[in-house]
Amino acid sequence: MASYILRRFIGALVVLFGISVITFIIAYAAPGDPARLIVGAKAPQTVVDAVRHNLGLDQPLPIQYIHYIGRLLHGDLGFSYHNNLPVAELIGQRIGNTVQLALASWIVEVILGLPLGIFGALYHRRTADYILSFLTLVGMSMPVFWFGMWLIQNVAYGLGILPLGGVGGISHLILPAITLGVTNMAFYQRLVKSSMVDVMSQDYIRTARANGVPAHRVVTRHALKNGLIPAVTYAGMDIAQLCGGVVLTETVFNYQGVGQLAWQSIENLDFPVIMATVLIAAVFVVVMNFIVDIVYSLIDPRISLS
Amino acid sequence: MSDALLEISDLRTSFKSESGYMNAVAGVSLSLRAGETVGLVGESGCGKSVTSLSIMQLLPKTAKVEGSIRFQGKDLLAMKEPDVRKFRGNEISMIFQEPMTALNPVLRIGDQIAEPLRMHKKLSKRELHDRVIELLKQVGIPRPEQIVKEYPHQLSGGMRQRVMIAMAMACEPKLLIADEPTTALDVTVQAQILDLLRELQARNNMALLLITHDLGVVAEMCERVIVMYAGKVVEEGDVRSVFRNPQHPYTSGLLNSIPKLIGERERLQPIRGNVPSLANMPPGCRFAPRCPHAKDICHTNHPSLLDVEAGHKVSCWMAEEVAAR
Ligand SMILES: Nc1ncnc2c1ncn2[C@@H]1O[C@H](COP(=O)(O)OP(=O)(O)OP(=O)(O)O)[C@@H](O)[C@H]1O
Ligand SMILES: [Mg+2]
């Protein structure tokens, strides 16, 4: 077990290193000159050159990367080009909001999607399943920005009971969490359903029935654990992605999270911030991957961690 | 036949499909006495598994099962699902062809064997555990105390089939249906499993319906044999009588298509042609298109199942003619 964790940890470092290289190269290759952006269009070229020199942007790419990694290892994410604040501080202000929204929408997704998926499997090819499938199809095809705007218009504005946007307290979380949660739930329901339908057609389910096990126990005791194996992976990857920031929903609801920050910094070509948001999203995915593997090994005895 | 343990009459099982109902079992009648071993043979797709799953009522919802299946005089087909459940795994058990997939990969062996006991017997935890260990010993599994805690993937195919047998034996059923229990196993393991079945069957005075492709297995294990072709019984009787004196050309064909180990080796004679598809059944005798002796009447009318000797029946126009003379 300990050696497994060590191996995974080294693996995770390699992945993060790779991601940092790729984002660094993409940031470098992107059009637009950050130094020019900082000083403004009218500043003389000498000022631009001076700024570029100050930021180390005139040095060769590998050197720039080594400096970047060196600072990163000291926990220094650099300064935002746009407003000259430490990137760590910008992210620190927002990460809490994003994680709150991520958790809230993830709970909506799983709490609705899991039982509805199981329900759909039990009523497979019957009227209830067809109705549910239609509804989830609508949920899947509904653009997040459209659904978010619709909720703002009709619930926040129309009924006047919830804030139009921004952050602060549970009331600000409800609409964005519903927006994200319902869309993701539609995907999740389908995944759980198809996984359960697949399991219910397996031979060992027939064995259980041949032993006189009643239908509800066939589902809860013999099918569910098997059906959950893919559902766990999916849910784990979803929470990781959500924690990395959700650009559209945060933007629609003017929700001050990492996703909105990422969007703004892309607009401003604010490379230190862009790279930090990508890296943080990657950290969430890598960590969640690890947790999913552990949960996996707890559910499925065929998988052992050593 | 009131002493029959299981009496199936005119069983018709069909599956719903786009082009209407497909008849997989078309009027099968058969019976088993307590403690008797009966072999059910026939080519792939002739309806052996569908017959056995009809008895257990384990077919998907697309299946329509008609006729009557009496077990100890009670018609299983007329019962509601909760009542049928009281028989499954209790009075009637079943083991399947594929031990690799028939066990649940995420449940411990001990829990899986205990499941029928939990369903049908009120036992304390202690009693349950002891019974499971006893069952594992009975089916010849070494280290039962450890095996109960293990998972199916940790066992070999033969061991898994033993586990399946232990599970099927848990409530001491009066009837065990074994659907090709050894097909997926190595030859040496096959013999062990068959020996085990024979031993358990004798000890518990349990009836055994043994579905197989292997006529050698039938010769060795069974008292009676039922030959099915395309959803119908074509011949049935005592194994000796049927094997020595097969009446149906299909049965003769089957017997000619197995290699002889002793005596002079002849050329194997496979039966020519293919099994008709469910959608395209010949109107008369279903074997007629492949039958070397087919006459006009064979293609138009279906022969009934007639006694040729005591306990030996056949469904063939040739036999009817002999009987009419
Ligand atoms: N669930 C099902 N839906 C539709 N048709 C089915 C179903 N199960 C079986 N059949 C059809 O019923 C017929 C009889 O199948 P069955 O499985 O009983 O054959 P079998 O005699 O057991 O053959 P094998 O020796 O290969 O096991 C086949 O034509 C098969 O395609
Ligand atoms: Mg079969």
Image (spheres, coloured by chain):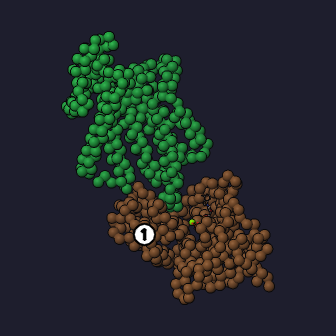
Name the residue beneath numbered marker 1.
B158
Question: Residue A286: percent from the left, percent from the top?
Answer: 32, 40
Q: Which chain is green?
A: A
Residue appearing at x 38%, y 70% in the figure: B141
Callout 1 secondary element = helix
User: Is residue A81 visible in this depiction of the protein?
Assistant: yes
Closest to the observer: A273 or B279? A273
Quarter in which the C terminus of chain B is drawn: bottom right
Ligand 2 quadrant assignment = bottom right
Q: Which chain is brown?
A: B
Quarter in which the N terminus of chain B is drawn: bottom right
Question: Residue A148: percent from the left, percent from the top?
Answer: 48, 25
Q: Is residue B91 above or below residue A118?
A: below
Question: Residue B26: percent from the left, percent from the top?
Answer: 69, 65
In this picture, residue A228 sits left or right of residue A126: left
Subunit ID for the residue under disc 1:
B
Closest to the observer: B159 or B188? B188
Name the amino acid, label 1: Gly
Q: Residues within 10 Å of mark 1 (few under 14, many from 20)?
A: many
Residue appearing at x 44%, y 19% in the figure: A164
Report the number of numbered marks: 1
Residue appearing at x 71%, y 71% in the figure: B289
Question: Residue A179: percent from the left, percent from the top?
Answer: 47, 28
Q: Quadrant of residue A132?
A: top right
Closest to the observer: A285 or A253? A285
User: Is residue A91 visible in this depiction of the protein?
Assistant: no
Q: Is residue A301 above or below residue B320?
A: above
